[in-house]
Amino acid sequence: MMNAKKSKFALLLAASAVTMALTGCGGSDGNDGKPGEPGGEPAPAIQKLNFTFNKSVVTNGVPSVEFTVTNEDDLPVVGLQKMRFAAAQLLPQGATGAGNASQWQYFGDETCDLASTCPGTFVDKKNGHYSYTFKMNLTANAKITYNDQLAQRVLIRAYNTPLPDGTLVPNSNAFVDFTADTGAEPGYSRKIVATESCNTCHQDLAQVKHGGAYSDVNYCATCHTAGKVGVGKEFNALVHAKHKDLTLGSLESCQSCHTENEATPDWGNWSRIPTAATCGSCHSTVDFAAGKGHSQQLDNSNCIACHNSTWTAELHTAKTADKKAVIAQLGMSATLAAQADNTAVLTVSILDKDGNAIDAASVQNKIKRLETITNVGPNFPIMGYNKSPGSGTAKVAKDLVKDGALQADVTIADGKLVFTTPALPFGAGDTDTAFTFIGLEMCNTGTTLTACTANSTTTSMKAELAFGTKSGKAPSTRHVNSVNFSTCQGCHSDTFEIHKGHHAGFVMSEQVSHAKDANGKPIVGVDACVACHTPDGTYANGANKGGFEMKLHVVHGEQGVIKECTQCHNDFNLDAFKVKGALATSAGKYTTPITATCTSCHAPESIGHGLENMGAIVNGDYTQANQAAQSETCFYCHTPTVADHTQVKM
C-alpha cells in the first residue's frame, strides 16, 4: 500500500524474484492451482488522518503551509487526491468596538482536486509530506483588510477520495493558527469549545451537517462568521439557537459544552465576554437594542459592567449545582418479599447522605411523591401497562407518599415504608421474579429540603430497583450490557430526571445497579424502565411502540441526534431475543420480537425482502405473533454488531 511506503509495484518485483528462483530449481513445478476468482480483496481503509503542520507563513499576502499526514498507525499517507484550503484571520477582543468579542474574518477557500483543477500550487512529496501555496492574495480581498499583525488560520478539509491504489480515506479536517511572518503561535486565540464536547452527544460532529465534511468544531466557528454567512447564522448565535430548546439536562449548564482543557484555552469566554448577539441567541425574547426585556443597550460596551464573569458563571450553572446538592442528601433501599398468597411485601427505607437508614416519618412532609411500579418477569414482563392479553394483569402502580401524606394501605413500621401488593402472576423461570422500580421526588428551596406546599420546587432523587422471588431462590435479572446509562448521561447529564412530571422522576445511579463490570464497578443499566415499557406497550397499547425494545429507538430517531448504534449501545446481546415473545407494534397488534425491534428504526419496506418469508409476523394478533416469536430466521443470515448492524454472513 502506498501509505505504508510499499507500492504494489515493489511487491510485484519481489514476487517475480521468488518465481525466478523457483524456476531455477529442479523438480516438478507442482499441480495446477484452482482458477482464481475475478478481482481481489478490496483495498483496506485508512481509519484516521493525522495532520502535523511543519511550516505556515504568509509571504507578500499569499499563505502557504507545509504539513505531514499519517494514518492511525503513524505511517505516512501518500497520494491524497483532493483537499480544500481556507484562510482566515482573527480580530482580537475589542478590535471592532468596546466589549466586542474576538471575531474570525474568512478570506476564502480553494479546492485542489488532482483529477481536475488546482488553483494554487500543491506538492505531494511522496513520503507523507505535502505543501500548498494559495493562489489568492489576502491583500486583494475587497471586503477584508489583511493585517499581518493578526493571528492567521489555514484550514484543510481532506476529501474522502480514494488514494491511487484504491485505499479508502475518511473525510478529515485540520487547521493551524500562526503569525504571518514567522509562523510562530499567535499570542491570542479563539478556541472556546472542544470537538469532544460536541461528540458527547453527536458522537461524530461530521454527521450533523454538510454531508460528513466537517468533523472539527473550529472549522464551523471559522466559517460561520460575519460576512461569510447571513445574520443569525454566525456560529456564536447559531449554535445556541439550535440547542436552547432541546430538553436535555446537559444543556442546563453552559459548562456542559464550555469545558476547560488543552484544546480550549478560551473556554471561559462564555462568562467573561458577554455580548448581545451571544446572550440573545439563548434569551431570544430579549431585544437589547429596543430595550425589550432588558435595559436598552445599543452596543456591548456596558455589558461587563453588570454581568461580571463570576456572577454570570454562577447564574448559568447554579441550577445543576443545586440539583446535585439536593440529590446527594437522601437515598433509598428496598426489599420485595413474595408471600404464600402471591402478594409481595415491599419495604422501602430512606437513607441519609452516608447511606444510613432514617425514620421515614422524619422526612415524610418533604416528600412530594414516592412512587412504585411492580411487574413480574424482568427479561420479558408479563404484566402490561394496561391489562396484558396474556396474563390478564397490569403493572401495580402505587404511590406510597404523595404531597407529604401516606397513601391508602401504606404504613410506617420501624421507620420504613411498607406496602403489600395485590396478588402477582408468579410462575416458573423468569416469572418467578417480581421487581419494583421506585422513584422519589422531594420538595426543596435551593439546596434545603423543605415541607411541601402547592408551589414547592421539587427535585427527583436517585431511583431504586428491588427484586423478589416466589421460590426464595436468587432472582433473574435483565441484561445490562447492551446500553450503559453513562451513555445516556452524556447527553442528558447525571442529574437527568426521567419522566419527571408524569412520574416522580427517576435519577439513575449506582443505587439501581445489580451487576458489576470487569473492574468491579457497578453497572447502571436501563433495565428498570421495562416495569412500565412492557411488551404490550404503554398507555396506547402498542400504538406508540411503547415497548422498551422499540421506544428508545423511536424517540431518539425523531430527534435526529442519534444516527449510529455506537452512540448508545456497547453490545446488542442478541441472545436476549431467545427469551422474548411478541411486542405490541400498533393498537392491539403484535409483531415477532426481532422484526419489531428492527422496524422501530427501519421501515419494513426498506429491509429488502419479505419479512413474513423469514418467519416474522407483522401486526398480527397476540396469540399468532407469540407462537411465532421464536421462529424468526433473521440471524441465520444477519449478524448485526454495534459497529455494523447491517453485517451478514457472506
Image (cartoon, rainbow, N blue to C red):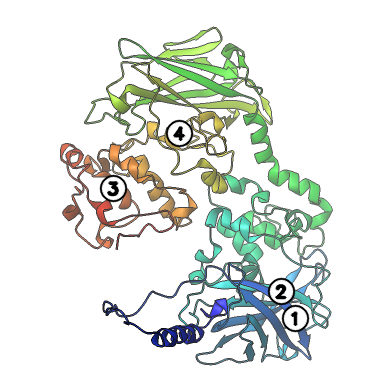
Query: Residue extending furthest top?
Result: 414
Name the residue type under label 2. Answer: Val
The disc, 2 or 3, on the residue closer to the chain's N-terminal end is 2
The mark found on residue 442 in the picture is: none
The disc, 2 or 4, on the residue closer to the chain's N-terminal end is 2
Name the residue type under label 4. Answer: His
Name the residue type under label 3. Answer: Ile
Q: Quadrant of residue 156?
A: bottom right
Assess whether mark 4 and mark 2 are in contact (beta carbons under 8 angstroms).
no
* Residue where numbered disc 3 is placed: 594
* C-alpha gap between disc 4 and disc 3: 30 Å
* C-alpha gap between disc 3 and disc 1: 55 Å
Name the residue located 30 percent from the left edge and 59 percent from the top edge: 649
* Residue where numbered disc 2 is placed: 176
The mark found on residue 56 in the picture is: 1
* C-alpha gap between disc 4 and disc 1: 58 Å
Q: Is residue 531 visible in the rendered structure shown here?
A: yes
* Residue where numbered disc 4 is placed: 502
Q: Quadrant of residue 108?
A: bottom right
Between 26 and 332, which is closer to the camera in this rendering? 26
Residue 406 sits above or below residue 441 on the image? above
Near mark 4 (Cα within 10 A), the count class, few <14, some 14-19 or many ≥20, is: few
Near mark 1 (Cα within 10 A), the count class, few <14, some 14-19 or many ≥20, is: many
Q: Quadrant of residue 398?
A: top left
Residue 360 sits above or below residue 302 on the image? above
Name the residue located 43 percent from the left edge and 32 percent from the top edge: 528
Give the percent coordinates (x, y) of residue 4.
56, 76
